[in-house]
Amino acid sequence: MKLAVLTATSTAVLIASVSTATLADQLEQSEHPSDNSLSLKLRNYYQDRQLKDFKQSYYIETLPDGTQRKVKNHDKQQAWGQGLEVNFESAYLGSPEAGIGFDFSLYGGLKLLGDKDRYGTTILKQDTPEYDPAKREYLADQSSYGKVGLANIKGFAGDNHTNIHAHAGWISIEKPLLKTYHRLTPTNFQGAKADAKLGDFDLYGAWTNKVSLYNHDKMEEFTSNKPGKDGRYKNRTKIDYIYTVGGSYDHESGFGADLAYAESDSYLKLYHANLNYTFLLAEETSLFLEGQVYHGKENGDKWTSGNTTFGGFDKDANLYNLNAKLTYDMLSLSASYSQIKAEKNDSLGYFDYHLAYESGHDYDDLGYSTKRQLSDFNYNGERVWQAGVQYSFDQLGLPGLTMGYTYTQGSDIEATNMARFRDKYKETEHNVALGYSFQQKELKGLSVTLLYAQHKGDKELSEIKNQDKDGYEYEGMTDLRLYVDYTVSVF
């Protein structure tokens, strides 16, 4: 009932704001716009996450000095917020063959719901959790935030067939191994990027030395998991830079390929290769086939030092992924398979794709299909099977409405050289997605999305990952995300 009230309230607020504004149609931007543009994006986001199947309500935490304390299990995480983006893109000044301009954005997140003892969804700005001895649990304030988003100089040279675009300053990055992450507002980076087009080939490069996470209002240093004196809490080792380069090829025959490489200073190297082909079986029927491989490799003493590893695997790791998607009219059927090798001595290894640690989680995402809403399905030894279906209701009189369901199962998960955990473990996840984009002219730019996930895994997986928390185990988790987006072009 509470969720229904929140949903109705948030949707009503957004629809009211649309109806009271004079909406202009979305401007079709040319490749090199000759006019300035200003757009607004509102995102109303609610999330409710619940751990399931606790055997007890407390666990015993062992501190670094060897002392122990009793801590209450956190079995629920909840937050609700209103996000705002104000995005300005200047026209290019110059000739049709070359020009310069700038981009500037303001981001903000307003707290609508976020109790101290319900931290963890990362929608809102969140303080460091601190232990409350009286309540025997960790508490953290959730709060509103505001910040400058994008602020960069941009330029281009060339024509529609051969050209280069570049940005420098506070930028967004959307590449296979390094990408902007969105919650109420997007993550932004300090650095530079360039994209070049050479016929059917697209090439790119991006470099960054700082990041401002989607729920934080400061530009921060990258850090590894290695103890040190840097980072947000002055307890990690600084990573000086991260960069990525790569390119893709798309042919009119349906063949596509891409290669990507990313590296973080003395921490991690990532490699990616992708081959895909689209078969046109009939007028409204197509089959998409894809094979890709990801390879990770340690890159120095910020990843491993002596016998201590600060990342998710020891020396190197591989993730192989195969995908097939059959589309007939409004119906799509998909199937995927992944296999992972990521050994870490005396631990449960996983394919760790985070190019930095403290400020790294949730911005450098990978695009393999078996990665799900709750689990990455990337543990050492894991074999993952997935099947999904999606339907668009356009021809049933409900244009703009889509619904999808995906089931994912992983098995053969194994820890490395752990006496207590010698078995092979498994996990599963159900995902439901429902979306609707309003088609009415007066509501253009308004959409609603609901995502629900239910994950279940052997309790030993949670025990291995929380070895310092005696008795902290669970067998499942649910996660509900509801967001309402409204984007309008002001001019």
Image (cartoon, helix red, strand yellow):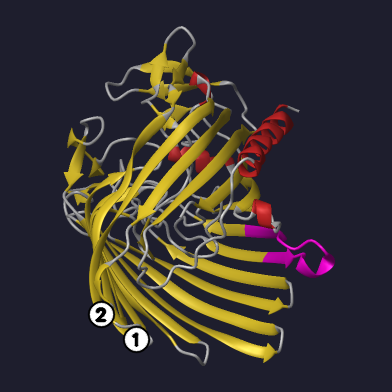
Residue 232: horizontal and vertical position, in percent?
25, 33
Q: Position of residue 490 (x, y in %)?
A: 48, 51
Q: Give the CA distance from mark 2 to mark 1.
A: 12 Å
Q: Residue 409 occupies which quadrant of the picture? A: bottom right
Instruction: Give the prevailing secondary structure in the magenta stretch.
Output: strand
Q: Which residues are magenta?
A: 388-408
Quarter of the image with the N terminus in it: top right
Q: Nearer the viewer, mark 2 or mark 1?
A: 2
Question: Looking at this view, is 476 or 193 the one in front?
Answer: 193
Q: Is residue 316 magenta?
A: no
Disc 2 element = loop
| Residue at 39% in and 68% down | 294
Q: Which residue is mark 1?
A: 161
Residue type, numbered disc 2: Glu
- Looking at the picture, how far across and down is residue 54, in whole percent? 62, 29
- As drawn, the label of residue 342 is none
Query: In the visual, does 32 lie left or right of 267?
Result: right
Q: Residue furthest bottom?
A: 253
Q: Is residue 322 above or below residue 270?
A: below
The reply to whether the magenta stretch includes residue 395 is yes
Q: Tally the marks.
A: 2
Q: Is residue 467 above or below residue 297?
A: above
Disc nearer the start of the sequence (2/1)? 2
Q: Which mark is residue 97?
A: 2
In x, y percent, where is residue 18?
62, 44
Say whether residue 279 is visible.
Answer: yes
